[in-house]
Image (cartoon, helix red, strand yellow):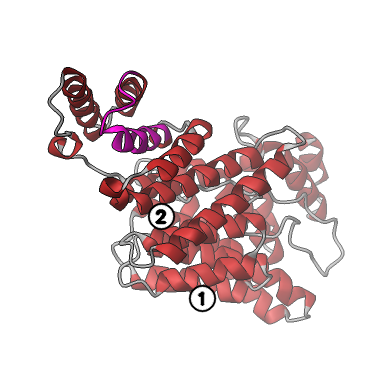
Amino acid sequence: MKPKFGCCNQAPGRTTGHVPLVGQRHLQLGRLLGKLFFLTLICLLPTSSVRSQGNDESEKEANRLAVTAATAQNEGDFSFAATRWKRLLDEYPQSALVGKANYNLGICLVFTNQFELAVPQLKKTIESLGEQDAALMPNAMMYLGFAHFRIGQQAAQSPDPTSSRRSNIELTTATEVFGRLIEQYLDFEEIDQAYFFQATAFENLGRLDEALGSLEKMFRHPNPKFLISGKILEAQIRDTEGKPAAAIAVYESILAENSDLDPAIKLEVDFFNAQSHVMLANQQLKQQQSTEAIDSFRKAETIFERIASLDATQVEIAGSIAHEAVYQRAFCLANLDQKQRAAELFTQISTVPESPFAMEAMINASRMRMDLNQIGLATELL
């Protein structure tokens, strides 16, 4: 999966002629997609729903296995449930429960992150579902699309040079599966999720117009499960298009319209919003709009300062982005001609060995000290 967006990859440029700062890097903040997806789509199974009517001994044993599997699945023990569903399929292939067993084995494989195994299992499910289990079809297609989607994301993160092509194939397949689901089951109650993951796959592929089209359709749904995540995705697409002002408008609407936003998600939105302000400031500098650029840097710096001040005990992910917030705040201060304070913040980060920004911060602190004619301090840092 390509990197997510926020600030530009280069340090903010200056018009005063001093040595540019070492490039910014950006922490990868998860959008909690998998977690949200599973919480909204998991299917609980009344044990009565997995019983067949057969009276011979083999069908009775298949019934017992199905009830054991369904109970484990409902309790979240997907690994054990998968073994029971597979045993049912292996030992009782003629059972009337085969359709349900195929389907639920596919679900368990998805929930245990065995996406490579889930794909053929869910394909088998879709091909073999009978009329009595036809209601399971849209869910099976949803899980199949999601499995392809996750394989595509995992391939994109692999160091294997051939993984990029694999990622594109899997993500493209995911968009097609979701597309067929949308076309065939438009009244499916979870159709908004199909739009959302189709949009995310399109975005990962760089097909931004199609991603925005899927999001627009999701937003028209009366109660989309992924409204906030969809808005965040929309804003990140606007950043990718080089439209940070549009991204800022989306981020600020999220914050203004959701006073009860989960603290971790609010922090993430704040962070992305600050990055978009820096991107906007860089654009404004290129357009010789120095007053506007100063205002954008100032807004970003204020947000980064607020994030950096959060205690990790207050918000679950605060500690994980505090160093980057301090680091990026220093960039903003440098562009606001507050070089002394910027140098102090860069120095602060450079003394934290575990920080991924320590080396770059040390170089930038030294350059800032040189700009300030603090030669001794610059030498000490190097």
Residue 306 showing in the rendered view: no
Q: Which mark is residue 265?
A: 2
Q: Is residue 138 above or below residue 61?
A: below
Residue 60 showing in the rendered view: yes
Q: Which mark is residue 249?
A: 1
- For the point 35% across and 38% down, the residue is 103
- Indicate the amino acid at tag 2: Ile
Q: Which portion, as a residue range, is magenta? A: 91-109
- For the point 74% across and 62% down, the residue is 12
- Crowding around mark 2 (Cα neighbors within 10 Å: few <14, some 14 to 19, many 20+) is many
Where does residue 36 sit, x and y in percent of width and height? Answer: 37, 49
- Crowding around mark 1 (Cα neighbors within 10 Å: few <14, some 14 to 19, many 20+) is few
Where does residue 333 sit, x and y in percent of width and height? Answer: 65, 61
Q: Is residue 179 above or below residue 2?
A: below
Q: Earlier in the sequence, mark 2 or mark 1?
A: 1
Where does residue 312 sit, x and y in percent of width and height? Answer: 40, 41
Instruction: In this rendered view, identify the residue nearer to me: 248 or 360.
Output: 248
